[in-house]
Image: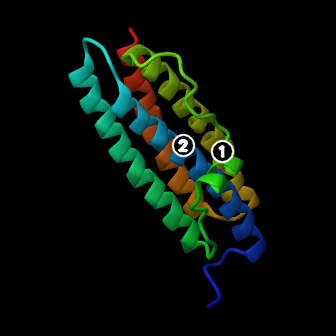
Amino acid sequence: MKTSIGISEENRAVVAHELAKILADEFLVYTKTLNAHWNLEGMDFHSVHLYFEELYKDSAEIVDSLAERIRQLGHYAPGTMKEFLQLTHLTEADGGGNDSRSWIHKLLGDHESIIEFLRGNVDDFADAHKDAGTSDFITGLMEKHEKIAWMLRAHLK
């Protein structure tokens, strides 16, 4: 059935493709956060282990909401690791230790990268592609990542 929501097919396709990149980034952060949760070691294990659990649960919700937004635009969300790895701007965890400081640095870098990518799309989605809904959606997403980044930085002080 045709999607008729007041946004041209061309604009919906462009926005859906950019959202697919964001979804890939988010899925990679989700996976990296699970890795951190599972493999964390150190004197602060218990408290940081619980914090990483909160983070990966939040990430799972973000992943689902992004996939649903893509579907609302009438497109299919990527759903394989191959697709995610082709679309993402981020890299997989590459060692560097399993202590909390190492994991927090890795995760912080990813969240900040996502913030920058989201910020770069807010105006384009609204203005160039006439999709105020997705612009608003990613603004809220950006705010979530800004809070997460702030909390991760606070752990490093």
Residue 149, disc: none
Query: Would residue 69 be visible to someone looking at this image?
Result: yes
Task: Measuring from the top left, give residue 31's x and y in whole percent.
Answer: 47, 42
Task: Measuring from the top left, give residue 38's x and y in whole percent.
Answer: 34, 33
Sequence-wise, the earlier of marks 2 and 1 is 2
Location of residue 100 by image quarter: top left
Q: Is residue 21 left or right of residue 137?
A: right
Quarter of the figure with the N terminus: bottom right
Where is 132 relative to 71, above or below? above
Task: Measuring from the top left, give residue 11's x and y in whole percent.
Answer: 74, 68
* Type of the residue with mark 1: Thr
Give 45 or 5, whichever is nearer the viewer: 45
Q: Secondary structure at mark 2?
A: helix
Callout 2: 10 Å neighbours few (<14), some, many (20+)? many
Q: Secondary structure at mark 1?
A: loop
Query: Would residue 143 be visible to someone looking at this image?
Result: no
Callout 1: 10 Å neighbours few (<14), some, many (20+)? some
Quarter of the figure with the C terminus: top left
Mark 2–mark 1 contact, CB under 8 Å?
A: yes
Which residue is labeled 1 in the image?
88
Give 47 or 126, whichever is nearer the viewer: 47
The span from disc 2 to disc 1 (Cα, nearest Å) is: 8 Å
Report the residue at 35% width, 38% height from top: 55
Give 146 or 75, whichever is nearer the viewer: 75
Report the residue at 50% width, 39% height from top: 29
- Direction top: furthest residue: 157
Question: Which color scheme did the rendering employ for the protein?
Answer: rainbow
Which residue is labeled 2 in the image?
28
Report the residue at 37% width, 42% height from top: 56
